[in-house]
Amino acid sequence: MRERRHPITAAPKSAATATLDYRVPFFDTDAMGIVHHANYVRYLELSRVEFLRQHDEPYQRYVEQGLHVAVIRVETHYHRSLRFDEVVRVTCWLDWVKGVSLGFRYVLHCDDQVVLTASTDHAVVDLQGRPRPMPSERRDVFRRLLAGA
Amino acid sequence: MRERRHPITAAPKSAATATLDYRVPFFDTDAMGIVHHANYVRYLELSRVEFLRQHDEPYQRYVEQGLHVAVIRVETHYHRSLRFDEVVRVTCWLDWVKGVSLGFRYVLHCDDQVVLTASTDHAVVDLQGRPRPMPSERRDVFRRLLAGA
Amino acid sequence: MRERRHPITAAPKSAATATLDYRVPFFDTDAMGIVHHANYVRYLELSRVEFLRQHDEPYQRYVEQGLHVAVIRVETHYHRSLRFDEVVRVTCWLDWVKGVSLGFRYVLHCDDQVVLTASTDHAVVDLQGRPRPMPSERRDVFRRLLAGA
Amino acid sequence: MRERRHPITAAPKSAATATLDYRVPFFDTDAMGIVHHANYVRYLELSRVEFLRQHDEPYQRYVEQGLHVAVIRVETHYHRSLRFDEVVRVTCWLDWVKGVSLGFRYVLHCDDQVVLTASTDHAVVDLQGRPRPMPSERRDVFRRLLAGA
């Protein structure tokens, strides 16, 4: 629970980030009147895809090369709820890179309040789901995008 | 709007049907406190897959043969809402069959009340989405499953 | 099936419309590699909410007045599939208005091709789901938004 | 990442558990041909609701008393993918209980292989989302359900 006591609510200053604004659709809400907790995992994907588009290459290029960036771990911490039609700002950055895997972090804000902090781990796999070493050009790009790079 | 004035709320007596009971999960509800209307289209799919499993062959066999049964039309009529944890009974039957397409009908009940009536049209396509004539064994099977057959 | 033979793929010239561009997220796709057919019903909602925001009033005002605009019928016709990261343009317009109900039409385009045509019917209900007459100011607004008005 | 190195793939022998079998619907898959990672968070909810039904009381009773068991943290570790129509067995148990919060653990199996391990933390809140002390009868029940109790 270390992450909860010291939630990381901002990217390191030197890190490349991607940011998107998302207006909560009615179909994302549940009978508690707020966004259902499972939907936030989708918001993370939206910002991660945007991060790759802006800083690396569109995700379809991976697919064209026979690769996927599979999700192997998700962790989400809920700080505040969201309601229909609120606009949430999702910020995503690369947290770490290894030979076959990489990690992202996320923070979601609404009205200057932290809504969610999250992290995801990923492995590069082929279209059959088998782990593959990350292409070296990708790894070089990712390393330059890391905080402090 | 003909269907609405005379909704079909039961399968013809001679028709093969498939029935499944579905307990409404919390994540299917929205901020109106009821099942979000888009989710019913998923309930139709569940019962259609069950119909094929019971009366034709499992859907994966189609995929193994390089075929999909693509959806080309959906029509849903909402008669009553559903809440979390209610159990809805979904009944599905084959309505018509042609050379490259077929149609299903559905009725959903809860506590002896009609919740939804629906119909869907489908075309047999290959894995690239191009229309394909229905394999003749499939068409024979489907014709036997029709009402009155 | 009248609508399919003569699909309405454009709003009447005199009609107020709302248009939004939606980039297909990965989580909207299914194992056929295309957007799952149930998700289009959500795209309709996005454009309908946008229509109300632009031409009537934000949907939350309805909720604040103890009203919902419940969906009572959905009809969707699938003309072409959509893949991850394609941008679809959703156009929505008001089709008809009566004392307690109203109807919208929709057309979705991608790369100048028609992806989907659709229509939805709605009833004004209170927060318990009981039909309510449409407030007269709303009805006046809706009538002005109709084609030919 | 402690959990990943030593994933907990079975409930303590003394713990009360709830188990449900879930057949993967087509609409849960994505263009990788497997269950989209966000959907697993919904599977956890299904088993948690089942746990409360079997061992505590139906979730609606909480709602009737003006309470929700809000999700404040989710952690999921993906070990193997799932495809359409596979049957996954979801097992859920209570992991810990405090004055205003509680935690569950989960393991998902398919064909004797671990598919997913997960944990969620929850807080008891009122219908406006404010933290509330857990009713003492509930806390007593939960403590009896804990491993080793």
Image (spheres, coloured by chain):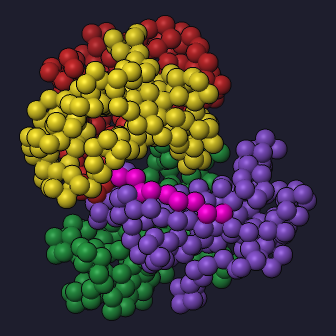
Chain colours: A green, B yellow, C red, D purple
x, y percentage for residue D108? 52, 70
Quadrant placement of the C terminus of chain A: bottom left
Q: Residue at x 16, y 37 (%)?
A: B139
**Res C43 seen here:** no
Residue at image position (37%, 51%) is D27
Residue at 70% across, 80% down: D12
Q: Quadrant of residue A37?
A: bottom right
Outermost residue toward the right in this view: D136
Q: Nearer the viewer, residue A30 or A107?
A: A30
- The residue segment tinted magenta is D18-26
| Side of B131 relative to C9 (left or right) | left
**Is A126 a magenta residue?**
no
**A55 over B146 or under it: above or below:** below
Q: Quadrant of residue B17?
A: top left
- A8 vs C19, left or right, is right
Left or right: residue B22 versus residue C113 is right
Q: What residue is at 27 percent from the left and 89 percent from the top?
A: A133
Q: Quadrant of residue D107?
A: bottom right
Q: Position of residue A85 (x, y in %)?
A: 51, 42
Q: Nearer the viewer, residue D133 or B113?
A: B113
Is residue B20 visible to the viewer in this orientation of the structure?
yes
* Residue D105 locus on image (x, y percent): 64, 72
Residue D57 position, x and y percent, is: 77, 51
> Is residue D23 within the magenta segment?
yes
In-front residue for pair C139/B72: B72
Q: Quadrant of the N terminus of chain A?
A: bottom right
Question: What secondary structure prevails in the magenta region?
Answer: strand
- In-image side of C82 versus A70 (left or right): left
